């Protein structure tokens, strides 16, 4: 088609130099202007794509009628070409064949150019690169693996970038494939299973000790080397425990149904602890020994639901000949309560090693008291009724609180919310005459929903500012109930397909029922997020109204001074120091609660959110719906306002020194024809306003 | 520019792209019926307040795809690169504001013409604004800078054309190229995700060629695929490209019946402008 390939190349070289040209160049970045453009042989047109394809000819293809072809149909037709894989190069690697294709990337078997070493190369698929999380996850995976050096963790060799700008990395090629492919080798050999999983457990323990949670341990991610030894791979969902690497997915569930821990499937990523990996280790061991995963179901959602609602089946009910100790080890890992599991992957490995050595294992069946505790957790309303009927006064409540709900947790942050169920009980007692007519009938059965309800309710018992409130509800039918003092609500956003909203004003507190996920749309087992705009009655919106400043009701026995309300306030200004009106400031709890609120800046660029429970929040600024800055850990303190100002400055990249606090900002970017973006860590330039407890964020290069 | 971060991880195209509905009687004849239920533009035009958020996201998505024609137009209007960047982002910021949706109505035609009309009006009033609010002023948050700084597949336009063509025509050329390129990119991705990138690389240069314009036998020998299979694959690839292209165009028009007209219009622009 091209008369001269050279001219196209010359043009490409020229366009490559764009970045170094100064702004006075007559060229612009949207179209390359050349003196002698190549022409299409066919139609003489000179408008060509970089590949040399003629735009005119391509467009005409759209008019030449041969009927449409769907993606699935084309996929089938593509599969008809069954010739051996054709090699091509990716950096220094000759790609030999595709050996895997996941949701995010594709894995190839490849040969390194000089060493001729066979490696595995993983790269992001370009159409995934526009997903805001994909590149970040990919980068995190490389980072996570690179920080680990363990004989049973798949090592990474090189991180690089392909010609089209997409990152890839090379790693050890596991000759025997994954455990998933080799299950039959282990099926009837419990000792072999235990040996393998003990090694995997040690590898996971090591990863945890380096601050990396795997979060997707399953047979497909345990590879086998030429000696049949395990290599833990695919840290694509890894979470670095320092807490600064979860921006894009803190509200989304990842992992694989059947192996994922219930709390990982249900909650925010911040809830996930090493115990989630312990659960997955147990699930893999279960699968190896029993020949099937602990929970089965027609779809991922039903599997996850079972895992969170029912105890795992006993191993020996499926394989009666197995040793009881192995059953106990599996059961210990598969406890729904993270605290009841092995405290570490190392403990799991050690018990397996003890079993292999013929020594007594450490894990023991759960005590009757623990069973009672778990039953109570599953049936809080029943307990509440019982408590209301049989025991009177705050003594009983505080007894309940201390006895039932203040169990020690791995995650320190949970202790702050340990008293939540008590508030729920109080609420039930105080409003016996208002049955929850606007709540889904099967709410009782949905323990998770119940918990969400409690969290939200507790967090919003005291009126906060009019604005957006919401809940991240890991449930099929999420709903949220409006706090007192709000008389109007509008569904703003929901990631549940076909979300519906119903506002009922019949009850003292209008309830919003939102979101029904259709059966067919359940393939995405992730949290539903509901956001509503809430308006308070005018009497409650005045800045001096005492109702807004009152402390939230506290549970009996809690220290009021320590638990008083916190508030967050500040300014949002543009580069000229002018206030930005109507910017959304999203305040999201980071300490395990699923609470968030969004307030809007007024005409003076001010925002304020009062009545917040003290704690750590992520504060995200959105202007016109676009994320501009996100401050990861903003501490709010009881009875004291915290100031957080957003001050946008256009700072030249070269012009400012790097000093001050570091934080994450969202930077839009393009890869190929895809526009995506990434969170990058930038320096705030050290601009901190005078006065304690005040922070000013200055983002560069907007 | 991303508007989807109110909901973390919300799919960019979720519920917004063309819905392919395959009915049970489609069979394997290669002519599966495709029903255009919702296009991004029709979604915007028909947005009620309930769907406003979705419509805004659809609009943001369209703006994201079609920034290049806008930028070319502003440049050709006579602004320096820096000013053109600022004005482009100011323009996008303006149309992405809530009230802009209210101005889009069914009488305004296609997204392309509406964007162009809005852009022209915007630039007419821009002169006084630029002096007052140099570099974007209070709306410099739409980071076109970041979009354009990336490695893009660029267009090749003759210097003469760039200097002589009216801005509107340059806008259309860039538009046409964006449409054609996006469809090609999606085709590439479909092939790659099925492990057939090599096939795309081998056949895509021949998408627009006639039978006698290249040698199947040579290609067949190079790829180790027999000639008949290769011919079939090229045929399939052309048809799939056609579908992808039409899908791409359909996102910017109100009704599926307008797709042909829009493609013809763009072809005519290309024939006029760059022969």
Image: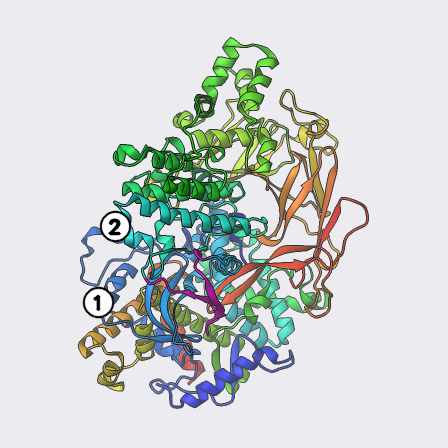
SS of the residue at dot 2? Answer: helix
Given residues A332 and B241, the one toward you in this image is A332
Given residues A460 and A301, the one toward you in this image is A301
Q: Quadrant of the N terminus of chain A?
A: bottom left
Tell which residue pokes out farthest to the front in this image.
A358
The x, y position of residue B224, in whole percent, is: 23, 78
User: Left or right: A339 with respect to A570?
Assistant: left
Whether residue A34 is in magenta: the answer is no
- Range covered by the magenta-colored residues: A151-175
The x, y position of residue A665, in whole percent, is: 61, 56
Q: Chain of mark 1?
A: A
| Residue A221 in sight | yes
| Residue A527 in sight | no
Bin the neighbour count of mark 2 within 10 Å (Cα to Cα): few under 14, some 14-19, many 20 and up: few
Relative height, residue A161 to residue A243 (above, below): below
* Residue displayed at 64% across by 66% down: B125
**Which residue is identified by label 2?**
A184
First in residue order: circle 2 vs circle 1: 1
SS of the residue at dot 1? Answer: loop
**Which residue is identified by label 1?**
A80
Q: Quadrant of the C terminus of chain A?
A: bottom right
The x, y position of residue A115, in whole percent, is: 41, 76
Bin the neighbour count of mark 1 within 10 Å (Cα to Cα): few under 14, some 14-19, many 20 and up: few
Given residues A527 and A241, the one toward you in this image is A241
Q: Splitting the image into 4 quarters, where does residue B119 fall?
A: bottom right
Relative height, residue A174 to residue A537 (above, below): below
């Amino acid at each position: 088609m091209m008369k001269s390939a050279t001219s196209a190349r010359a043009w490409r070289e020229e366009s490559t130099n764009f970045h170094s040209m100064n702004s006075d160049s007559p060229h612009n970045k949207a179209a390359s202007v050349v003196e002698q453009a190549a022409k299409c042989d066919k139609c003489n047109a000179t408008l060509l794509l970089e590949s040399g394809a003629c735009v005119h000819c391509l467009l005409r293809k759209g008019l030449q009628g041969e009927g449409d072809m769907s993606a699935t149909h084309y996929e089938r037709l593509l599969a008809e070409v069954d010739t051996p894989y054709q090699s091509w190069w990716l950096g220094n690697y000759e790609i030999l064949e595709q050996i895997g294709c996941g949701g995010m990337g594709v894995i190839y078997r490849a040969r390194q150019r000089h060493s001729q070493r066979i490696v595995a190369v993983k790269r992001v698929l370009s159409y995934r690169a526009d997903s805001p999380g994909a590149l970040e996850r990919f980068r995190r995976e490389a980072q996570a693996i690179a920080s680990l050096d363990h004989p049973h963790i798949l090592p990474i060799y090189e991180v690089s970038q392909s010609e089209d700008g997409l990152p890839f990395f090379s790693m050890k090629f596991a000759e025997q494939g994954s455990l998933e492919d080799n299950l039959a080798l282990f099926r009837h050999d419990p000792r072999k299973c235990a040996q393998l999983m003990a090694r995997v457990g040690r590898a996971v323990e090591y990863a945890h000790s380096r601050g990396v949670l795997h979060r997707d341990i399953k047979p497909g991610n345990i590879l086998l080397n030429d000696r049949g030894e395990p290599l833990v791979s695919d840290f694509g969902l890894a979470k670095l425990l320092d807490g600064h690497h979860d921006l894009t997915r803190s509200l989304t569930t990842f992992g694989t149904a059947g192996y994922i821990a219930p709390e990982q499937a249900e909650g925010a990523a911040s809830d996930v602890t090493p115990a989630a990996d312990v659960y997955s280790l147990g699930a893999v061991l279960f699968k190896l020994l029993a020949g099937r995963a602990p929970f089965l179901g027609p779809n991922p959602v039903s599997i996850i639901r079972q895992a969170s609602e029912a105890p795992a089946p006993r191993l020996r009910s499926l394989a009666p000949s197995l040793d009881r100790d192995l059953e106990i080890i599996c059961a210990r890992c598969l406890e729904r309560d993270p605290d009841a599991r092995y405290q570490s992957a190392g403990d799991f490995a050690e018990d397996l090693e003890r079993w292999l050595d013929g020594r007594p294992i450490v894990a023991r069946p759960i005590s009757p008291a623990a069973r009672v505790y778990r039953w109570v957790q599953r049936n809080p309303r029943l307990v509440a009724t019982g408590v209301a009927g049989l025991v009177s006064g705050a003594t009983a409540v505080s007894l309940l609180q201390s006895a039932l709900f203040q169990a020690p947790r791995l995650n320190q942050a949970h202790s702050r919310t340990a008293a939540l169920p008590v508030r729920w009980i109080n609420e039930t007692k105080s409003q016996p005459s208002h049955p929850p007519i606007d709540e889904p009938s099967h709410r009782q059965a949905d323990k998770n929903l119940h918990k969400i309800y409690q969290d939200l309710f507790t967090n919003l018992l005291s009126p906060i500012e009019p604005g957006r409130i919401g809940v991240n509800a890991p449930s099929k039918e999420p709903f949220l109930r409006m706090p007192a003092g709000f008389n109007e609500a509008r569904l703003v956003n929901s990631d549940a397909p076909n979300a519906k909203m119903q506002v009922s004003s019949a009850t003292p507190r209008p309830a919003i029922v939102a979101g029904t996920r259709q059966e067919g749309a359940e393939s995405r087992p992730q949290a539903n997020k509901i956001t509503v705009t809430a308006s308070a009655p005018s009497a409650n919106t005045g800045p001096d109204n005492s109702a807004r400043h009152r402390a939230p009701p506290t549970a009996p026995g809690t220290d009021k001074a320590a638990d008083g309300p916190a508030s967050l306030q500040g300014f949002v200004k543009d580069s000229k120091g002018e206030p930005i009106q109507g910017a959304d400031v999203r305040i999201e709890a980071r300490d395990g609660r699923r609470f968030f609120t969004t307030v809007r800046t007024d005409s003076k660029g001010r925002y304020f959110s009062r009545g917040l429970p003290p704690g750590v929040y992520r504060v995200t600024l959105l202007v016109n719906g676009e994320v501009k800055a996100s401050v990861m850990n903003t501490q709010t303190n009881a009875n004291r306002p915290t100031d957080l100002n957003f001050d946008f400055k256009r700072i030249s990249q070269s012009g400012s020194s790097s000093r001050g606090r570091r934080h994450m900002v969202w930077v839009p970017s393009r890869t190929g024809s895809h526009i995506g973006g990434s969170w990058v860590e930038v320096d705030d330039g050290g601009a901190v306003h005078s006065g304690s407890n005040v922070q000013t964020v200055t983002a560069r290069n907007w | 520019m991303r508007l989807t971060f109110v909901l973390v991880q919300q799919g960019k195209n979720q519920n917004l792209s063309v819905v392919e509905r395959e009915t049970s009687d489609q069979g394997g004849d290669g002519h599966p019926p495709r029903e255009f239920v919702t296009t991004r533009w029709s979604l915007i035009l028909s947005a009620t307040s309930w769907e406003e958020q979705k419509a805004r996201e659809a609009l943001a998505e369209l703006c994201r795809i079609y920034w290049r024609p806008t930028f070319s137009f502003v440049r050709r209007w006579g602004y320096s690169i820096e000013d053109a960047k600022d004005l482009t982002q100011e323009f996008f910021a303006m149309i992405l504001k809530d009230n802009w949706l209210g101005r889009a109505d069914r009488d305004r035609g296609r997204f392309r013409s509406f964007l162009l009309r809005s852009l022209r009006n915007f630039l007419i009033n821009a002169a006084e604004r630029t002096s007052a609010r140099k570099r974007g002023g209070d709306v410099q948050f739409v980071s076109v800078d970041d979009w354009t700084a990336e490695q893009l597949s660029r267009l090749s336009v003759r210097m003469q054309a760039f200097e002589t063509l009216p801005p509107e025509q340059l806008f259309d050329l860039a538009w046409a190229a964006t449409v054609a390129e996006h469809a090609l990119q999606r085709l590439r991705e479909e092939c790659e995700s099925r492990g057939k990138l090599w096939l795309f690389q081998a056949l895509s240069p021949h998408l627009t060629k006639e039978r006698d314009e290249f040698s199947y036998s040579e290609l067949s020998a190079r790829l180790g695929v027999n000639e008949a299979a290769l011919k079939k694959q090229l045929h399939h690839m052309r048809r799939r490209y056609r579908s992808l292209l039409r899908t791409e165009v359909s996102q910017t028009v109100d009704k599926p019946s307008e797709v042909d007209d829009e493609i013809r219009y763009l072809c005519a622009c290309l024939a006029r402008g760059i022969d």
